């Protein structure tokens, strides 16, 4: 269950005629699930680095071959 409510999870309770902070309370027996922290890697940037490294190695190899002959 995600918090429900408006800005900063503040909502108006019509039954008690007051503002309330937070969603529904936690009851005995409730299960709290905390998602795993995701690795923040920009995949295309990692791939770009690998492609750049391959192009670099090709250029160095070509330079050695040209210089040798």
Image (tube, helix red, strand yellow):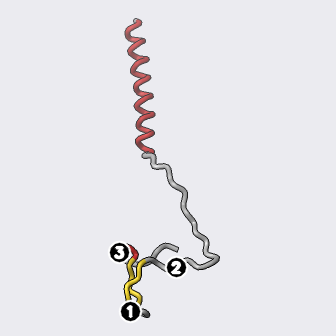
Q: Position of residue 3 (x, y in %)?
A: 46, 74
In the picture, the disc for residue 50 is none
Label 2: element kind: loop
Toward the right, the furthest residue is 29
Q: CA distance from mark 2 to mark 3?
A: 18 Å
User: Which residue has dot 3 on it?
Assistant: 7
Q: CA distance from mark 3 to mark 1?
A: 18 Å
Label 1: element kind: loop
* Observer-nearest of 66 and 26: 26
Q: CA distance from mark 2 to mark 1?
A: 18 Å
* Observer-nearest of 18 and 39: 18
In the picture, the disc for residue 25 is 2
Question: Is 68 displayed left or right of 29 in the figure?
Answer: left
Q: Earlier in the sequence, mark 3 or mark 1?
A: 3
Toward the top, the furthest residue is 69
* Observer-nearest of 21 and 67: 21
Marks counted in the figure total 3
Q: On screen, 36 above or below 8?
A: above
Q: Position of residue 20 (x, y in %)?
A: 41, 82
Residue under the image location 41 percent in, 78 percent down:
21
Q: Position of residue 37 (x, y in %)?
A: 51, 55
Residue under the image location 47 percent in, 78 percent down:
23
Residue under the image location 45 percent in, 39 percent down:
47
Q: Earlier in the sequence, mark 2 or mark 3?
A: 3
In the picture, the disc for residue 17 is 1
Q: Residues within 10 Å of mark 2 (few under 14, many from 20)?
A: few
Q: Residues within 10 Å of mark 3 (few under 14, many from 20)?
A: few
Which image quarter: residue 51? top left
Q: Earlier in the sequence, mark 2 or mark 1?
A: 1
């Amino acid at each position: 269950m995600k918090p429900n409510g408006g800005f900063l999870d503040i909502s108006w309770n019509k039954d008690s005629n007051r503002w309330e902070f937070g969603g529904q309370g936690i009851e005995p027996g409730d299960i709290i699930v905390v998602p795993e922290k995701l690795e923040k890697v920009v995949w295309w940037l990692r791939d770009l680095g690998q492609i750049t490294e391959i192009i670099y190695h090709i250029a160095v190899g070509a330079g050695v071959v040209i210089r040798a002959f």
